[in-house]
Amino acid sequence: MGQPQFVHMGAPPFAEREIELTPGVHTITAVTGDNTHAKLSVPPPVSVTFLVQPPGA
């Protein structure tokens, strides 16, 4: 359902999501939007980059 590269936080549960990621480097960016899904400039988007290790690594 939807696009897997987008995680919508406007529906319960609001505080967290569990997503499956393949091993490797991933970047997640949090972007706020209004009720029409237009991107807001305040607060600015925030990104975090992290490494998912393969099982048993």
Image (cartoon, rainbow, N blue to C red):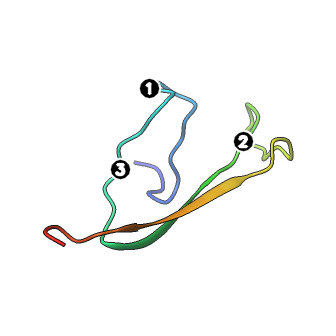
Q: Position of residue 46 (x, y in %)?
A: 69, 53
Q: Residue shown at 16%/67% (left/top)?
A: 55
Choose between 51 and 14: the one closer to the eye.
51
Helix, strand or loop at disc 2? loop
Q: Tag 1: Cα neighbours inside 10 Å, few (<14), some, or many (≥20)?
A: few
The residue carrying mark 1 is 13
Can you name the residue that lies furthest to the front here?
Answer: 57
Above or below — where is 42 with respect to 2? above
Choose between 44 and 37: the one closer to the eye.
44
What amino acid does circle 3 point to? Answer: Ile
The residue carrying mark 3 is 19
Above or below — where is 56 with respect to 37? below
Q: Earlier in the sequence, mark 1 or mark 3?
A: 1
Find residue 32 and name its label.
2
Residue 48 sits in quarter: bottom right
Can you name the residue that lies furthest to the left here?
Answer: 56
